[in-house]
Amino acid sequence: MMSLNGKYSIGILLTFVLLAFSMLYSIPLINYFFHFKTITADLFFYNRLSIWFVLILIVVYNLSFENRSFFVWADKKYSLGFYFAAVFALYLICVVGGTVLNGIIMLITHEKISDKLVQLSSIFKNNYFLIIFTCLTAGVTEELLMRAYIQPRIEKIYNSPSLGIIVSSLLFGILHSTYGTIGQVVVPFFIGIVFSLFYKKYSNIKILIICHFMFDFISVMLMNTIDLKQLSAF
């Protein structure tokens, strides 16, 4: 009979493989059936929908094989004031840290804005349903899978909080490599570290979901006001 740590290991591997498959191959797979000639709002919506399907599969695996609560760490309750302060502080750290890291990377590598981001900016233009759905998908699914599911299980397997933080953040960064730039790996890795440290100390996934949603929502809304095609030419 497989040990609980063995089941956790399979769950972690399954989560990463399914997420990688969804991000790398869901668009070509959807195109095979629907024959989209280019990336469209509908195509990207189906792509985001596939990530929810991954979350459902992992929840089913958890209930069927791990036979334990999805949340290894029980969610702690905090005051409304703490929620506001935590979300604001996390957002500020991520924005400032991400901006500095992006600036350093661009200075060293002369890296341009991700072509994928430029492409996505056109389909997000004034499509508020897609913007909200995309940001909600990232906030809910990525935090539940990367922080609530993967991080504490890695810590349990290796009896190492540091390894749980680092490995879950590294996987988080790697999954964003589909955007095709160094910055789109390093900055998510940094944000993953910040979020993982917070989750380890305060054990509240709802705050991270709210902050992740807010970070992505504000970023995408800013994309709506800036012509990335012109910026990418520099």
Image (cartoon, rainbow, N blue to C red):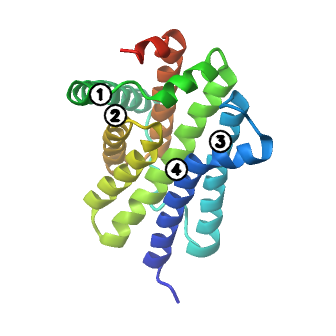
Mark 1, Cα crowd under 10 Å, few <14 / some 14-19 / many 20+, is some
Depth check, mark 4 against mark 1: the one in front is 1
Which corner quadrant holds the C terminus? top left
- Looking at the rendered structure, the kind of residue marked 4 is Leu
- Residue topped by disc 1: 102
- Residue topped by disc 3: 47
Q: Dot 2: what SS? A: helix
Left or right, residue 136 beside residue 162: right
Q: Could you tell me how far apart the alpha carbons at marks 3 and 4 are, in whole angstroms?
A: 18 Å
- Looking at the rendered structure, the kind of residue marked 1 is Asn
Residue shown at 66% from the left, 56% from the top = 56
Disc marking residue 144: 4
Depth check, mark 3 against mark 4: the one in front is 3
Q: Find residue 33 and report its horizontal and vertical position in percent.
A: 78, 47
- Going from the N terminus, do you reach mark 3 or mark 2 first? 3
CB contact under 8 Å: marks 4 and 1? no
Disc marking residue 112: none
- Going from the N terminus, do you reach mark 4 or mark 2 first? 4
- Going from the N terminus, do you reach mark 3 or mark 4 first? 3
- Looking at the rendered structure, the kind of residue marked 2 is Gly
Disc marking residue 183: 2
CB contact under 8 Å: marks 2 and 1? yes
Q: Could you tell me how far apart the alpha carbons at marks 2 and 1 are, in whole angstroms?
A: 6 Å
Seen in the picture, residue 127 relative to 2 is either above or below; the reply is: above
